[in-house]
Image (cartoon, rainbow, N blue to C red):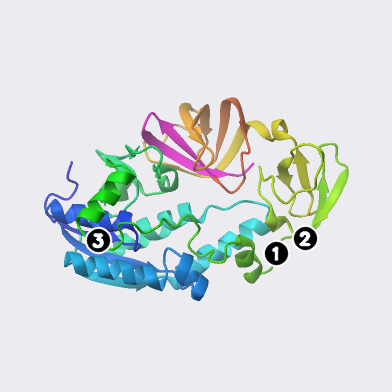
Amino acid sequence: MDPVPQRRRVLVAMSGGVDSSVAALLLQREGYEVVGVFMRNGVAGKAAAEKSCCSASDARDAAIVADRLGMPFYAVDYAEEFATLMDHFAAEYRRGRTPNPCVLCNQQLKFGRLFALADGVDAAAVATGHYARVVDGALHTAVDGDKDQTYYLFGIDRAALRRTLFPLGDRRKAEVREIAAAAGLPTAQKAESMEICFVTGGDYRDVVRARGGGGRPGRFLDAAGREVGRHDGVDGFTIGQRRGLPALGRPHYVASIDPSSGDVVLAPREGLERQTATLAGVHWLVEPPAAGSPVRAAVKVRARHAPAGATVVADAQGNALVRFDAPVAAITPGQAAVFYDGDRVLGGGWIEA
């Protein structure tokens, strides 16, 4: 269904990668008047140029594609907004949590500020190269399950979804590259950026420690509470982590982090399993259920997690309790929990405990 039948101008968020390049191309072929926009994150330096998905070289690639397609193109400075995301990122690690800045970026920037830009150029909709689908105003998973990105999109405003286009939602990644190559786009074989855009040096702790210092140093404890080693900061750990831990004779993982004491508790794999999670900041993409009413859903607790059957009970203050049908490993504070009904996204929230 065409959500913009009257005004067919569309603002496309272009990252300089193959996905957003092909999204713009496909919209042009469908008869839309396409305007491209690139979001600068303000991160500079050699590493940023090589690894950041919002780098100067990516801006150049996006501009080349826009020129090849004969479409207007703008680069917008969002350094201040990205700085706020980076500050939040660092603060979360110091709190012993594991943040997910890509969800916040989509919620606050790509599907927040971009609609104001769209209105400024009289565009009826915003489009991106995300692998997702909008069906009758509802968010659904992509055809290519391996590339589906709906986990990162649960925070989009419901009204914004009615003005959002995901041209790649019905296509597979291999097909997208073939389309780019056939059209002679220079991004056809460009490698994907798998890192957080502002973590350009390969170690997220560099960002944390550059923005207010690292987390509290402290002890490694085993499940019985015995000290088994020391570490130099809780910002170096996340729930479920195995690397960088003391050797205890069998594989152990980070089971909990106490930012106030600096204690990091280690446990064998079975010690990571939990059957409940408490959430805050719950956002619904369907009509919100009545407070206290149970909702059956399949719930993802991280991007690559297979959805697990659960019952979600939300209150009127934006909190929820998720009770899984079976224990789930490594439920991590700071990450998102996203609710699905089949291929439809119902909503999600932020894991507190």
- Residue at 27 percent across and 40 percent down: it is 170
Q: At which x and y percent is residue 60? A: 33, 72
Residue type, mark 1 in image: Gly
- Magenta stretch, overall SS: strand
- Is residue 180 toward the left or the right of residue 215 in the image? left
Q: Which of the two discs, 2 and 1, labels the residue nearer the N terminus?
A: 1
Name the secondary structure under disc 1.
Answer: loop
Residue type, mark 2 in image: Asp
Q: Residues in magenta?
A: 336-353
Tell me if mark 1 has few (under 14), some (14-19) or many (20+) residues whose alpha carbon lies within 10 angstroms of its own. Answer: many
Q: Is residue 114 above or below residue 270?
A: below
Q: Residue furthest bottom?
A: 45
- Is residue 156 toward the left or the right of residue 318 in the image? left
- Residue at 68 percent across and 59 percent down: it is 94
Q: Which mark is residue 185?
A: 3
Q: At which x and y percent is residue 347? A: 43, 39
Q: CA distance from mark 2 to mark 1?
A: 9 Å
Q: Which mark is residue 214?
A: 1
